[in-house]
Image (cartoon, rainbow, N blue to C red):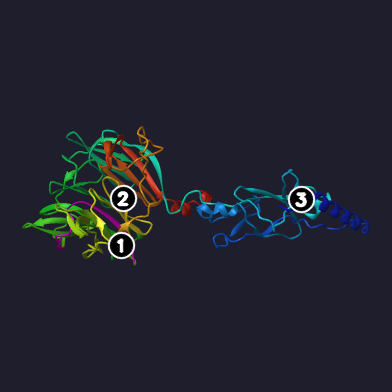
């Protein structure tokens, strides 16, 4: 970089001040105190001009919107397009450590913070040496790809959780249910880190469905309904008639009689009932539980409606809440792709009034069949996955068509080429795992994965990779959502 030594400029200003002072016997001259930067701009990066903030109080110049991950290959040699002051001189240290004037016509390496100074005319003349303002130029670049999931280990639940499990959030508490011998155990936590273990009284087996509403939790087991108000003590419910097979979903329904914002919506439960060997979809409002004739028959379920392990998610579209579900069938639904028959999953949607089949059997937009499937609504898209954790599928049109998610949005997989490799917290492996549950922290955009303790035998061609894992909790978050919520971490 071509730079002029500050000593020459300072000498010029000192002579100027001496001459001016000699012409004024009263010494009433007020020298400009302006030693601040008024504007800063870099050359474009990927064709974009990024806005920089000048924090005068802390002497910091930075970009609030971080540059893309690989922008460090551009800012290692970039021009400063604008760097202006009212009357000062801007310097930086040269290779010999001397203050030298910046020449913005030469490129700079801004991968690291750059320390600069603005010298007022008084400081240059030696009259007011303290009128020098330091600044730090910090060009923030994302260290993580915004389109990738970042994974973090949360901790353990309890190694007595070894088989199937179900996790719900009720009010401000998380409940994980599992079997320990012949007893139903429930682990409860307010933060998914510290857990309390208790017996779930009133339940003889792990429910096949558990549905939290606003004030009550409903569950089904052996075609009976159970209810609880605390997640621990359960009783058989008398609020439903007939044979209830499984709860499907809950959806907020607008309350026309609401007096407060808290009463604006009422939870509506939907469920499957069998009548004369025909499955029907029913609904009931939480506020009408226990009221005679409050159950509403919606429609016959249809042969493509899932029968078990149903997972649902709720989101708002056009001012109205909707459900989308996915689940398993007693017999797989198959499509023909080439010369193969492929088992597929069919998504269903609910608008609070009608259930409709959404999924497609198109050979280019189908969703593969998952065992123990989970569906979530995340970052305005639908995602689904299941046992074995081999892939994640995404739908951009509310469950109608599906495709494999980008490889950046995936589970952590490891390289097993080293025969001595074993998964660790630092290098986790999810592939092959079963017996899990998922809950979302919508406030902080986390997806929590709770795994039962288990043994896995991965098959990779002719090779097998056995490994064991504890009852672990992991969480994932899309990097761009983290960046949006944490401006102070914008450079992460």
Q: Quadrant of residue 376?
A: bottom left
| Element class at badge 3 | loop
Q: Nearer the viewer, residue 239 or 179?
A: 179
First of labels 2, 1 by sequence position? 2
Q: Nearer the viewer, residue 477 or 458?
A: 458
First of labels 2, 3 by sequence position? 3
Indicate yes or no whether the magenta region holds residue 313: yes
Q: Which residue is mark 1?
A: 398
**What range of the chain is rendered magenta?**
298-317
In this picture, residue 310 sits left or right of residue 190: left
Marks 2 and 3 in Cβ contact (< 8 Å): no
| Element class at badge 1 | loop
- Front disc: 2 or 1: 2
- Between the residue at mark 2 and the residue at mark 3, the CA separation in whole angstroms equals 61 Å
Residue 306 marker: none
Q: Which residue is mark 2?
A: 391
The image shows residue 232 at horizontal and vertical percentages of 24, 40
In this picture, residue 117 sits left or right of residue 258: right
In this picture, residue 241 sits left or right of residue 157: left
């Amino acid at each position: 970089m071509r730079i002029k030594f500050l000593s020459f400029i300072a000498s010029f200003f000192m002579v100027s001040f001496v001459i001016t002072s000699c012409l004024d016997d009263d010494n009433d001259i007020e020298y400009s105190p302006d030693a601040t930067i008024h504007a800063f701009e870099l050359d474009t990066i990927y064709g974009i001009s990024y806005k920089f903030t000048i924090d005068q109080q802390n002497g910091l110049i930075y970009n609030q919107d971080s540059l893309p991950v690989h922008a460090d290959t551009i800012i290692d040699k970039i021009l400063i397009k604008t760097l202006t002051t009212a009357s000062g001189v801007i310097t930086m240290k040269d290779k010999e450590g001397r203050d030298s004037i910046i020449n913005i016509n030469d490129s700079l390496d801004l991968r690291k913070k750059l320390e600069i100074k603005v010298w007022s005319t008084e400081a240059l003349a030696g009259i007011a040496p303290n009128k020098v303002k330091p600044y730090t130029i910090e060009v923030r670049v994302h260290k993580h790809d915004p389109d990738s999931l970042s994974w973090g280990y949360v901790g353990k639940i309890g190694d007595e959780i070894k088989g199937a499990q179900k996790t719900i959030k009720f009010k401000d508490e998380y409940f994980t249910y599992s079997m320990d011998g012949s007893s139903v155990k429930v682990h409860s936590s307010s933060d998914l880190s510290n857990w309390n273990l208790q017996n779930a009284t009133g339940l003889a087996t792990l429910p096949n469905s558990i549905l939290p509403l606003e004030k009550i939790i409903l569950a089904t087991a052996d075609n009976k309904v159970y209810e609880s108000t605390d997640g621990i003590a359960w009783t058989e419910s008398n609020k439903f008639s007939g044979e209830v097979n499984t709860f499907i979903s809950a959806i907020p329904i607008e309350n026309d009689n609401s007096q407060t914002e808290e009463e604006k919506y009422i939870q509506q439960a939907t469920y499957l009932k069998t009548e004369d060997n025909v499955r029907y979809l029913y609904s009931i409002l939480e506020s009408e539980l226990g009221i005679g004739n409050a159950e509403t028959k919606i429609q016959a379920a249809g042969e493509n409606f899932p029968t078990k392990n149903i997972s649902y998610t709720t989101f708002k579209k056009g001012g109205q809440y909707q459900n989308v579900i996915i689940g398993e069938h007693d017999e797989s639904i198959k499509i023909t792709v080439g010369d193969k028959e492929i088992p597929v999953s069919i998504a269903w949607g609910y608008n609070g009034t009608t259930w409709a089949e959404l999924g497609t059997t198109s050979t280019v937009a189908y969703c593969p069949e998952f065992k123990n499937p989970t569906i979530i609504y995340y970052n305005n898209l639908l995602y689904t996955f299941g046992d074995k954790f081999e892939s994640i599928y995404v739908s951009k049109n509310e469950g109608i068509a599906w495709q494999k998610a980008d490889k950046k949005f995936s589970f952590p997989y490891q390289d097993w080429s080293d025969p001595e490799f074993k998964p660790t917290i630092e290098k986790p492996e999810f592939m092959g795992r079963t017996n899990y549950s998922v809950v979302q922290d919508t406030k902080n955009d986390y997806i929590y994965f709770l795994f039962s303790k288990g043994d896995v035998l991965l098959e990779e061609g002719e090779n097998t990779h056995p490994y064991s894992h504890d009852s672990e909790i992991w969480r994932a978050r899309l990097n761009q959502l983290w960046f949006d919520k944490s401006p102070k971490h914008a450079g992460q």
